[in-house]
Structures are given as structure tokens and as C-alpha cells.
């Protein structure tokens, strides 16, 4: 499947992959900007090309549907997102329970325009003691850029400014929704 995915990604769609995913068993992948449903198949193609299992989390009810098997097959992990449960703690527990877990998410939390990111991924990385791998989906240049692992410090503001700067100028499928820190 990797060769077919590479052919579609590079030859049919005209995209390039810059950088490489680390050979670590556990980390958080933040993908920015997230502006369109097209990001899903770009991500699936990249995952297939690099042949590294990547995961996502979803509310547990999603996995109880007739499509639950598909979500699990795609790397999904169910979590209880009810008000009585702390989502950060639930995801940290997944990191602790598994030998291999690479959590991919969009810190914007939506496909619409945002001025700041949700911070849960940062607190998960710190509590689980895993690095963050920044991945840019740049539709203008048709490239997916992968940054080496970044370990959060004890200075959240500095860390976020560093991450925001990595994505500066990256254009999503819907350019006006692309992330830009004011």
C-alpha cells in the first residue's frame, strides 16, 4: 500500500514529503492548519507512505457504532469525554497502557479560523513525557513538512511561540482559515 500511496501523493496529487517521522514509539503529532476534510486523506496517504502506525482519539460512543471496527482499524482509541472524566488524564493513560502510541491531532480543534490553539495536547505531552512532532500541511506549496521531535519545557508561552512560528506562512486548503497567530 505504501508504494500506491506514494504514487497517488506524489504523481497524481503533486505533493512532496519533507522531513521524516522519528523512530520513537510514542509522541504527539500536531497537524496545522486544519481547514478542510481534504486533510484527512492527505494524512492517510502520508501515514501509509511512511508505514508508521498513527493514532487518534474519539469519544467512546463513536466506537460503539456499526463503523467502530473501521475507526479502530484506522488507529482510533476510544475515550470517555463525559464531564466527570478528564480528557488529558484519559489520553495520558493510553500512552501509559500501550507500548506504541503516536497521537495525531489538530490543535486548532476545528476546521474554521482560530486565533489560538487548544492546549490539551501540550499538557498530554508533558504528563506522558512524550515529544511533540509538528507537521505542516502546506497546500500552497503542496508539501507536508515534518519537524524533528520537540520536548515541551516548563515555559508554556515560549513553547507555544516556538510552535506557532513553525507554522507561520503555512497555507491550508481554505487559505482564509489558515492559522496565524496575531
Image: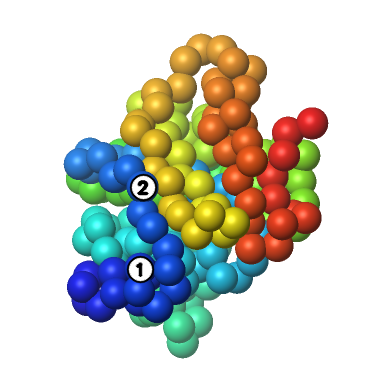
Q: Do the residues labelled 1 and 2 touch (CB within 8 Å)?
A: no
Question: Reading the chain from its start, which is encountered first: label 1 or label 2?
Answer: 1
Which image quadrant: the N terminus?
Answer: bottom left
Residue placed under numbered mark 2 in the picture = 18
From the viewer's side, name the closer residue of 144 and 92. 144
Task: Give the spatial CA distance, label 1 vs label 2.
Answer: 12 Å
Element on which disc 1 rests: helix
Residue 172 seen: yes
Please provide percent x and percent y for residue 124.
Answer: 48, 35
55 vs 93: above or below: below
Q: Which mark, by number, is residue 10?
A: 1
Which image quadrant: the C terminus?
Answer: top right
From the viewer's side, name the closer residue of 61 and 14. 14
Please provide percent x and percent y for residue 12.
Answer: 40, 78
Q: Residue at x 35, y 68 (%)?
A: 10
Identify the residue at the far top of this view.
Answer: 154
Quarter location, residue 47: bottom left
Amino acid at each position: 500500500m505504501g508504494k500506491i500511496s506514494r504514487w497517488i501523493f506524489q504523481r497524481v496529487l503533486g505533493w512532496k514529503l519533507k522531513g521524516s517521522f522519528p523512530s520513537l514509539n510514542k509522541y504527539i503529532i500536531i497537524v496545522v492548519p486544519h481547514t478542510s476534510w481534504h486533510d484527512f486523506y492527505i494524512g492517510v496517504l502520508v501515514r501509509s507512505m511512511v508505514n508508521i502506525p498513527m493514532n487518534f482519539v474519539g469519544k467512546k460512543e463513536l466506537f460503539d457504532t456499526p463503523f467502530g471496527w473501521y475507526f479502530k482499524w484506522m488507529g482510533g482509541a476510544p475515550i470517555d469525554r463525559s464531564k466527570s472524566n478528564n480528557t488529558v488524564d484519559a489520553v495520558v493513560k493510553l500512552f501509559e497502557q500501550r507500548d506504541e502510541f503516536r497521537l495525531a491531532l489538530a490543535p486548532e480543534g476545528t476546521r474554521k479560523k482560530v486565533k489560538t490553539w487548544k492546549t490539551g495536547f501540550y499538557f498530554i505531552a508533558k504528563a506522558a513525557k512524550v515529544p511533540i512532532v509538528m507537521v505542516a500541511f502546506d497546500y500552497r506549496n503542496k508539501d507536508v513538512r515534518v519537524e524533528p521531535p520537540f520536548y515541551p519545557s516548563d515555559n508554556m508561552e515560549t513553547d507555544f511561540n516556538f510552535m506557532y512560528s513553525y507554522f507561520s506562512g503555512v497555507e491550508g486548503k481554505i487559505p482564509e482559515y489558515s492559522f496565524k497567530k496575531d
